[in-house]
Image (cartoon, rainbow, N blue to C red):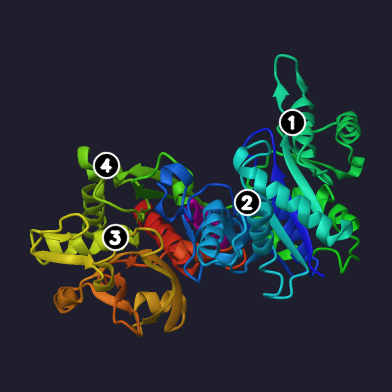
Amino acid sequence: MTKYIFVTGGVTSSLGKGIIAASLAKLLQARGFQVTIQKFDPYINIDPGTLNPYEHGECYVTDDGAETDLDLGHYERFLNTPTSSANNVTTGKIYQTVINKERAGDYLGKTVQVIPHITDEIKRRMRLLENESNYDIIITEIGGTVGDIESLPYLEAIRQLRRDLGAEQTLVIHLTLIPYLSAAKELKTKPTQHSVKELLQTGIQPDILVCRTEHPISKEIREKLALFCNVEKEAVIEAIDAHTIYDVPILMLKEKLDRTVLKKLNIRHKSEPDLSLWKEFLGKLKNPTREVEIALVGKYNELPDAYKSIYESFIHAGAINECRVKVVPIHSEKLEANDVIETLQGYDGILVAPGFGERGIQGKIEAVKMVRERKIPFFGICLGMQCAAVEFGKNVLKLKDSASTEVNPKTNNPIIHLMPDQIAISNKGGTMRLGAYKCKLVKGSLANKIYGKQLIEERHRHRYEFNNEYLNRFETAGMIASGINPETGLVEIVELPNHPYFIGVQFHPELKSTVENPHPLFIAFVKAALDYKKSKNQ
């Protein structure tokens, strides 16, 4: 039978449940177990697709087109295996399903209640992945913190599932905070004790405590926590602040988290974890021989999580190039008010980031103009690619009102326009071009050389597309479409062959970069930045 591990949080949010879950999954995977992770979010939105990036960070998209929580990005980057819509469930999805069943008469006229109907649907979703790939272990992260009203149905569902499946089939890990009071110069356990007490009131006794801390936890503190929280001493795990999230699996290995989990679930050790590739990556990450500075021109720079996958992709690509990539956020709105050349000329490469809406667009277009003319390595993603097309139309083809209809619906030259199947849609959630689509690369193009093959598959999240009515004029003037969707003919990649490195992609390559398989476009971009820096210095 599949074993279930539930990860809950207490005291405060943002302690890193997703990183702990992903790290544990990595250790178990490295021992030879089939593992997956799912995230249950208590908010009532159906998914994060309509949430402002400032509200929730980036919206991570899976191959099957699900708009999900950014923690799924951590799961994929650590495990190097794709997730799906089944890996992220929200309260909105739960209630929507139950209400639809009630409207259809599936409950035979019974009064629909939180218990059993909502909790039954939560349990059904928790077990949905069970038969997908014969998983040995499924890790379920519960969003929010214990004590939140929104989390109560999920905790009740866990209590019921533990009763249904039996003690050796389920395990609860509670992640909590051990704060350090500088005035008293000591770590305090009371917040953790109260958090566990809150969890006990829901009928759940945690099996393992993972304690986030800024300072090492002493033997005495472990014994105290074990006594007051009713867990074994070896089940009190220290999670000290790490230099990088990629250190956490190694730290959890030293704390024997995986061994404790296997012992409590009564699973025989298949083998010791093989983390050779992971350690090789960490070695390169921590011992760079070179450095480049990349400007990330975006509009949500106040919250780094809005571009989380891009930042992580640069870490992966930097390690492969044995190079430290210093990513400097530049707000595109500030470029509209300041001298673009003065602001950007010192960088070794410019990435124009994804986004929606009119705000900051002109700053992005000015950034593209500068890098095109000054031959600085350029990488445009989604809206960044669209800005590259608009800028080329405006300044090379001399179409002065060249624009995207997202910004200027009345333009006479809609270089970027709304897809025909999107025009009549009024709902915003889940209605874009979402998920993985095939793309055929032009033989001999820069994109073809980077990927090393002609047919690729990448993930999308957008409504607007390059207008193919302008394609011939663009290619005659020097900007080629090097990647085309073979089924629809839509332009996926544009590049400038007469430029050292200028490439824009309609898809989101950052969503496929992992520790073990860094994305080739990011690897090539970092290498181009290194070459540019070298030539600049010479």
With respect to residue 200, does 91 lie above or below? below
Alpha-carbon span between mark 3 and mark 4: 28 Å
Mark 4 or 2, closer to the camera = 2
**Callout 4: few (<14), some (14-19), or many (20+) C-alpha neighbours within 10 Å?**
some
C-alpha gap between disc 3 and disc 1:
48 Å
In front: mark 3 or mark 2?
2
Residue shown at the point (59%, 66%) measured from the top left: 86
In the rendered image, residue 114, in percent from the top left (x then y), is placed at 64, 50
Give SS at disc 3.
Answer: loop
Mark sitting earlier along the chain (3/1): 1
User: Do we see residue 287 in this rendering?
Assistant: no
Who comes first in sequence, dot 2 or dot 1? 2
Q: CA gap, disc 4 to disc 1? A: 40 Å
| Above/below status of 352 relative to 338 | below
Q: Which mark, residue 426?
A: 3
Q: CA distance from mark 4 to mark 2?
A: 49 Å
| Numbered badge on residue 113 | 2
Q: Is residue 394 left or right of residue 291?
A: left
First in sequence: mark 3 or mark 2?
Answer: 2
Disc 3 crowd rating (10 Å Cα; few below 14, some 14-19, many 20+) is: few
Frontmost of labels 3 and 1 is 3
Q: Determine the CA span between mark 3 and mark 2.
A: 32 Å
Residue 478 image position (x, y, % from top left): 19, 73
Q: Position of residue 303 (x, y in %)?
A: 44, 41
The residue at the point 67 percent across, 36 percent down is 147
Q: Which residues are magenta?
A: 308-320
Q: Which mark is residue 178?
A: 1
